[in-house]
Image (cartoon, rainbow, N blue to C red):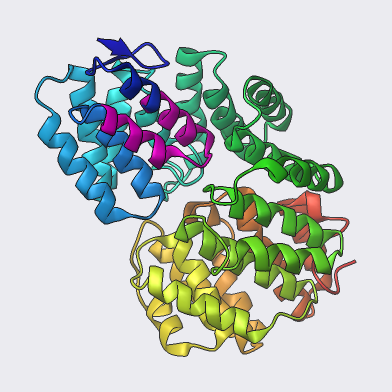
Amino acid sequence: MLADQYGLPLTTSVLEARDAYVTGVNHTLAATFGASDAFAASVEADPGFALGFVGLARARMYDTDIPGAQKAMATARACATQLTEREAAHLAVFELLLQGRTTEARRAVQDHIANYSRDVLVAQICTNIFGLIGMSGEPGRESLQLAYTTQLLEALGEDWWIMSVHGQALCEVGQLDEAMSMMERSLALNNVNANASHFKAHTLYEQGAGEIGRAYLADWIANYDERSVLHGHLSWHRALWALEQEDEAELWEIYSSSIAPAASHSLPINVLTDAAALLYRAEIAGLDVEPELWSDLSDYASRYFPNPGMSFADIHSALAHAMAGDGDRLAVLAETQSGFAGDLVRPVARAWGAIARQDWTAALQNLTPVMAEHARLGGSRAQRDLLELTYLNILLKSGHADEAHRTIKSRRPIFSQAAPVAGFG
């Protein structure tokens, strides 16, 4: 019986199947393009390799090919006749995930990792900003994420993948020096790891090191395949820094080539949230945003997120609908409470509607109660700055300049001297 790169036995005796499986796992952990091809090669070499089909199902999920993922998982089940206990549990976790049973899947992941801490493809499900902990809507989820990655770090040690996701968890709780150290150690071991590059960008953002971050990502992304899952989101970071540094030409070039729905190869939740946040942050910075960009994004949101329930996506869908003037679509989100933080989605959606009408009093009334706990909506600190800067802009528009300065200084001090909001100074 062969073993994977973490020393875990695999029920295949075909070396080519094992090697391609290892390649697929590495692509998944590094967020690089090629996981689907690698797992497909693995099961072609050994059509009875169940975990190869599980890996293929995971890769198809990242490709947003759910029918393909379901087909791969069905084949995995058919092959699962002589699996080890660990492999059988591994397969069961991904069945729950693919069925959308996220609460059960999260519990299964944590139970599994308690027994098999080196099973990284399972462990990965609960890491990252969009993992099952990050998108749980629970108060204190950042601390839960850090506790989880700390457990994994203790088991895996000097491993390029765990250091990158542990660094992200450190960054989100404000331990920036420790986060940067983790990123640098991860990149030293594997510089093509897009997760480490991504989280290094987050840490630089939190440190207010925009010029350094912009130069770093421009250099790093040059060799990153644009079909990779994080290419659009890394481009979003670059565009934000271009906005802060008043390079409007680069901002729109990056948007049109890498972030807009027609250009991005990212997951739909990243396409929607990145595009909506960038367009509105450009608006409040005083730039002109073409109306058709909002219309296109509203249509995209309606196509990929037609029903409320994924709260982080819902607030961005509501923004797109409001700015596109689509009151019917907006009303669904403003009047429905569904999802892990649905109680916060409704007032945010109503605030976007008020903003579109330039009713700053109503916008302030709706958004103010959300600000104390908007972390429950999901996303990183950098992503939730959409709400922080929107709140700042509303205060300015409402004639509360002194309060605006006090609020940003206490809530997001990195913007206290120079926030990218027109009229702030």
- Provide residue 2's location: percent of width, then percent of height: 30, 11
391 or 242, which is in the foreground? 242
Q: Position of residue 413 (x, y in %)?
A: 78, 50
Give the overall secondary structure of the magenta segment: helix
Nearest the eye: 368 or 210: 210
Q: Which image quarter holds the C terminus?
A: bottom right
For the point 34% across and 33% down, the residue is: 41
Residue in the image at 45% along x and 72% along y:
301
Residue 22 falls left or right of residue 213: left
| Horizontal and vertical percent position of residue 57 | 29, 42
Residue 220 image point, x, y percent: 72, 40
Magenta span contains residue 336: no
- Residue 158 found in image quarter: top right
Position of 289 relative to 65 (above/below)? below
Name the quadrant containing residue 112.
top left
Is any part of residue 52 visible from this angle?
no
- Res. 284 in view: yes
Q: As drawn, is 219 to the left or to the right of 418?
A: left
Instruction: Please say if 391 is above or below 298.
Output: above
Residue drawn at x 41%, y 65% as measured from the top left: 343
Count of marks placed on residues:
0
Q: Which residues are magenta?
A: 21-45
Question: Quick one: quadrant of the N terminus?
Answer: top left
Identify whether 39 is placed above or below 14: below
- Of 302 and 73, nearer the camera is 73
- Location of residue 58 with respect to 90 vertically, above or below: below
Q: Residue at x 51, y 42 (%)?
A: 33
Q: Is residue 24 magenta?
A: yes
